[in-house]
Amino acid sequence: MTIKTFAELFASHCRPLEGGKAMSDDAVRSQLKELPAWSTDGKRISRGYAFADYWETIAFVNAIAYAVHREDHHPELVVGYNKVDVRFDTHSVGGISENDFICAAKCDAIYTDRPKARST
């Protein structure tokens, strides 16, 4: 597998991987260099995001839900008042795939470009 830059991941789209193979641990570690805030436990990639308040948290969740649904690749989300943990793996390959990194890049882009919390 060729390692993609953040921009290449962001511009890519998920593809069906039925019968495909999970990425090797070495390939996962190499690809994570393009997404340094993400980590792996060997079975999935994950990242926590922090927010100012609940409104900003839920706005982010809704934005990533829209983006990843368009890719037909859905994460596990753990949502709190001012934080979200996002975890990706690819069930059809029994591990981590390029699709996980594509969606992780899209989540990071949404986080970077998100509107900041409202003043009250």
Image: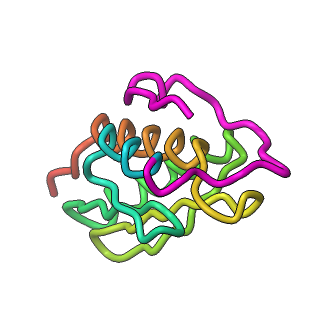
Viewer-nearest residue: 119 or 100? 100
The answer to whether residue 91 is left or right of residue 114 is right
Viewer-nearest residue: 36 or 113? 36
Viewer-nearest residue: 112 or 16? 16
Residue 41 lies, with reference to residue 27, above or below; the image says below
* Highlighted range, magenta: 1-26
Viewer-nearest residue: 85 or 36? 36
Question: Furthest residue to the right?
Answer: 19
Residue 113 lies, with reference to residue 22, above or below; the image says above
Instruction: Identify which residue is drawn at 22% across, 52% down.
Output: 117
Where is residue 40? Give x, y as percent: 40, 64
Q: Does residue 21 belong to the magenta stretch?
A: yes
Total numbered circles: 0
Color encoding of the figure: rainbow
Instruction: Identify which residue is drawn at 67% across, 37% down.
Output: 14
Q: Does residue 27 belong to the magenta stretch?
A: no
The answer to whether residue 74 is left or right of residue 37 is right
Q: Quadrant of the C terminus?
A: bottom left
Does the rendering let one see residue 22? yes
Instruction: Identify which residue is drawn at 31% across, 40% down.
Output: 114
Chief SS of the magenta region: loop
Where is residue 73? Give x, y as percent: 67, 50
Q: In which quarter of the image is residue 74?
A: bottom right
Instruction: Identify which residue is drawn at 67% across, 40% down.
Output: 71
The answer to whether residue 18 is left or right of residue 28 is right
Where is residue 69? Give x, y as percent: 67, 47
Does the rendering let one see residue 66? no
Q: In which quarter of the image is the N terminus?
A: top right
